[in-house]
Amino acid sequence: MKRLDGLRVRHLALFAGLMLAPFMGPAVSPAAAQASGCEQIKTFLDQRKALVERLNKLGKKPDAKSACSLLTNLASNGSTTLKWVDSNKDWCQIPDEFVNGFKADNSRVTKFRGQACNAAAQQATMQKRAQQQQQQQSNSPFNVAPGGDVLTGPMRIPQGAL
């Protein structure tokens, strides 16, 4: 019975310590004080994760325009995160391996963004040309309607009495 009471007391003390720790502020430990400015990286990484998930939902052959848009957002997130990491690396004790891996990843994203945006621009140019060609063909005097010929134009039905 005494052993159970001792366990209960320890558990209650541990529970009380865990519940009161957030209210004690940064005086609790140096790690807690240090973490006060370091939580912002979680926001950047959560945004990045959401963008990658949206990009993965596009499938194996994504539309170039939507891929360009998402990759542009992802590259922007990477640049912002890298700026933050460079300025807070020492304070937040971010390992060099993470920084180097993140830089390499952002470099690949920037490369893919360039490819996707170039493909989107080419698609837009091709669509514009196709529309112009269709418009020119419909306005052409050589456009022959069914039942007519080039010299006389479309065949007309005579009006009035024959």
Image (spheres, rainbow, N blue to C red):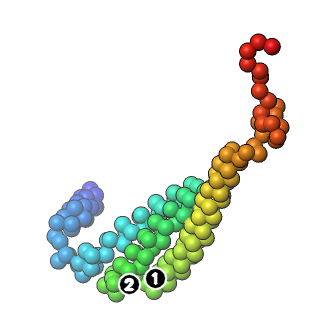
**The N terminus sits in image quarter:** bottom left
Query: Does residue 99 lie above or below 162 as drawn?
Result: below
**What residue do we see at 69% from left, 44% from top?**
138
Q: Residue at x 41, y 79 (%)?
A: 82
What is the x, y in percent for residue 108? 57, 76
For the residue pair 52 and 12, the one nearer the viewer reads as: 52
Front one among 149 and 137:
149
Q: CA distance from mark 2 to mark 1?
A: 8 Å
> Looking at the picture, does residue 52 appear above or below residue 80?
above
In the picture of the structure, the residue carrying the numbered disc 2 is 86
* 62 to the left or right of 15: right
Contact check, label 2 and label 1, Cβ < 8 Å: yes
Secondary structure of residue under mark 1: helix
Q: Residue at x 50, y 62 (%)?
A: 69
Residue 87: image location, x then y, percent = 34, 84
Q: Position of residue 89 (x, y in %)?
A: 36, 84
Label 1 neighbour load within 10 Å: few <14, some 14-19, many 20+: some
Among numbered discs 2 and 1, the one appearing first in the sequence? 2
Q: Is residue 53 left or right of residue 87?
A: right
**Amino acid type, label 1:** Val
- Which of the two discs, 2 and 1, sits closer to the camera? 2
Tell me what residue is drawn at x 51 percent, y 76 percent.
Answer: 106
Kindly identify the amino acid type of the residue bearing the numbered disc 2.
Asp
Quarter of the picture containing the C terminus is top right
What is the secondary structure assignment of the residue under circle 2?
helix
**Residue 32 numbered mark, or none:** none
Q: Nearer the viewer, residue 161 or 10?
A: 161
- Indicate the quadrant where residue 160 lies: top right
Question: Of residues 90 and 87, which is closer to you in this image?
Answer: 87
Answer whether residue 25 is visible to the viewer in this image: yes
The mark found on residue 99 in the picture is 1
